[in-house]
Amino acid sequence: MRVEVRNGNVDQAIRVLKKKLQQDGLFNELREREYYTSRSEKRRRSKAAAIRRQKREELKRELEEFNGGKKKKNSR
């Protein structure tokens, strides 16, 4: 991964690097590898994550139906 330092602005380059690492999932992986987790714990976590994803998708569908399928436009 490469980040350019422009005009000697190291702080901006560090922010860009941190954002790229966050999107890449490195920090989450480091947090997971910090301690040993048993198979059953991994299974429980993955099942809980799947349930959260499903609820989020369900809520999203309900909101789309409620709004008549219209998506909000960005005001930018």
Image (cartoon, rainbow, N blue to C red):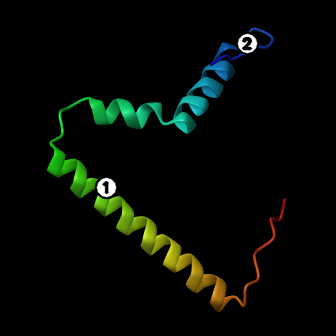
Lower position in the chain sequence, tag 1 or tag 2: 2
Closest to the observer, 34 or 5: 34
Closest to the observer, 67 or 7: 67
The residue located at (64%, 91%) in the rendering is 66
Q: Position of residue 70 (x, y in %)?
A: 76, 82
Q: In screen coordinates, is 58 left or right of 64?
A: left
Q: Position of residue 32 (x, y in %)?
A: 30, 36
The residue located at (39%, 66%) in the rendering is 52
Q: Secondary structure at mark 2?
A: loop
Q: Residue most toward the right?
A: 76
Spatial separation of the CA atoms under disc 1 and disc 2: 39 Å
Q: In screen coordinates, is 40 left or right of 70?
A: left
Q: Residue most toward the top?
A: 8
Q: Is residue 56 above or below residue 62?
A: above
Closer to the eye: label 1 or 2: 1
* Mark 1 nearby-residue class (10 Å; few <14, some 14–19, many ≥20): few
* Mark 2 nearby-residue class (10 Å; few <14, some 14–19, many ≥20): few
Q: Is residue 67 above or below residue 35?
A: below
Q: In screen coordinates, is 51 left or right of 38?
A: right
Q: Is residue 71 above or below residue 75?
A: below
Q: Position of residue 12 (x, y in %)?
A: 68, 22
Residue where numbered disc 2 is placed = 5
Number of numbered discs overlaid on the protein picture? 2
Label 1 is placed on what type of residue?
Ser
Which quarter of the image is occupied by the N terminus?
top right
Q: Which mark is residue 4?
A: none
The residue located at (20%, 32%) in the rendering is 35
Q: Which mark is residue 46?
A: 1
Q: Secondary structure at mark 1?
A: helix
